[in-house]
Image (cartoon, rainbow, N blue to C red):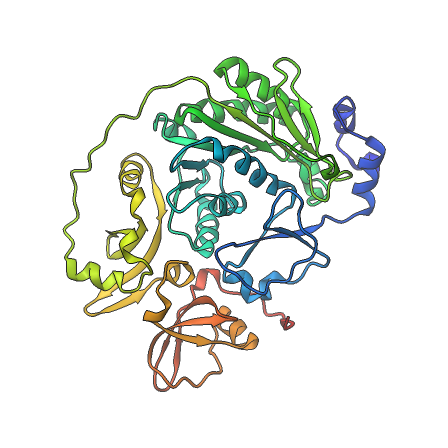
Amino acid sequence: MNEQLFPDNFLQSLSAENGFNEENFIKTHQVSDAPTAIRLNPFKHSATKKDEQVPWCADGFYLNTRPSFTFDPLFHAGCYYVQEASSMFIDHIFKNIRPNIEGAIKVLDLCAAPGGKSTLLNSAINADDLLLANEIIKTRVPVLTDNLSRWGQANVIVSNNDPKDIGRLKSFFDIILVDAPCSGSGMFRKDPQAMNEWSEANVELCHQRQERILADILPALNEDGYLIYSTCSYSRQENEDILDWLCQEFDLESIRIPIYKEWGIVETQSTQQKAWGYRFYPDQVKGEGLFASCLKKKNNTGELGTFKNNIQQKISSKEIDQVKSYITDADNYYYFKVQEDWLAINRAHKESLNILQRHLYLKKSGVRVGKLMGKDLIPDHELALSTIINKSAVLQTELTYDQAIQYLRRDNIDLNPTEKGWSLMNFEGQALGWAKLLPNRINNYYPKEIRILTNQSPLAP
């Protein structure tokens, strides 16, 4: 890649930016590949391979070589997430501001798909905290839901709503992350095709869209709450200029986040309000382009008001007891039905769930446990991957690597079980999903929409 392959006026637009080194920037795009990084799931300890640690995220690690994640059962079990290292800086921001808020908090990831930052936030919050992961584009919701189901936590809700709809939940959230749609210049090395879409006109359109999204969502942020704003763009119009606008129009206070010089992150300030921002250049950090910032809301935009849920589901205690037998620390959860499916969410979030159900279009709430059929539970895939499942209440079958790949392809499994019934199918002790063990066969219940489709031969790890 040479200088001429960058879009017209792109390098010129960055020439005055703090920390930008044109020669090194061009060279990095010419000669170096994007590094591969993963972030471990702290709730699922495994023997996942890892090399050098990402300096701003304790669970983040670089890999010296990029494996075939498709053929790693531990990836499908939710033991880690493949995530660009720079974006893990959100973890560092969150852990610097979380101690400033007392008690349980409610967190919103507004533009959440495919789920990298949502799983990051889900790892960082406490069990009594709640995460709402929202995706505006309907077709991107399934991958977000799948990734959060793999992560296994019960204190998360997924929604598919416009920012304006969520903005009506006045002062509901304590922390809001807006990883805004942008012109994408920070991904040029990883995705050279993104260059074809970059233009100064598109940068301006993105700037206007970002202002609209932020104006719509800010009423939902509580007084003294924090807004984390990020993009994968280098353009000042989408970054520092947005910070100036937020401080001027909404009287937000810029928060300076401590960083170490050896990390290679460039600390910047906006032109007018001197708001702090953090730029990641791929020639200076081991990661892709990113801009991140944090601001605090000083004023109150009103309250949502009290909401009393008068619609109580008529649920027999016998049925609840059946469901609870599959859950560890079962009394810590609130159980409810959506059509025929039983779900469980941390009991602390019952009221929040009722409010969100009334105002938003929800796609996932807590953990889907399964359906009751007489005395039997037909368990859901979400229960298998959850960290709340009572594994002593179900059969478990340990698979070899080859058997695990057969299972993940939804093929027949070379196995001769001695027991009958629903069984968790495990690899290295980590659940992959369910199968029904019968006297003369095994019924594979791995969800067909997420099965391994490729016919290439896997290489055992």
Q: Quadrant of residue 431?
A: bottom left
- Work out which quarter of the rendered image holds the N terminus and state it: top right
Q: Position of residue 314 (x, y in %)?
A: 14, 51
Q: Is residue 150 left or right of residue 395?
A: right
Q: Nearer the viewer, residue 44 or 33?
A: 44
Q: Position of residue 146 (x, y in %)?
A: 45, 54
Q: Is residue 62 left or right of residue 298?
A: right
Q: Position of residue 317 (x, y in %)?
A: 15, 58
Q: Position of residue 118 (x, y in %)?
A: 49, 44
Relative vertical location of residue 7 with respect to residue 409 in this rendering, above or below: above
Q: Nearer the viewer, residue 142 or 118?
A: 118
Q: Is residue 187 left or right of residue 145?
A: right
Relative vertical location of residue 274 with respect to residue 341 in this rendering, above or below: above
Q: Quadrant of residue 126?
A: top left
- Work out which quarter of the rendered image holds the C terminus and state it: bottom right
Q: Is residue 211 left or right of residue 317?
A: right
The residue sitting at 65% across, 45% down in the picture is 85
The residue sitting at 52% across, 71% down in the picture is 428
Q: Nearer the viewer, residue 290 or 26?
A: 290
The residue sitting at 73% across, 57% down in the picture is 64
Q: Quadrant of residue 356?
A: top left
The number of callouts visible is: 0
Q: Nearer the viewer, residue 208 or 261?
A: 261
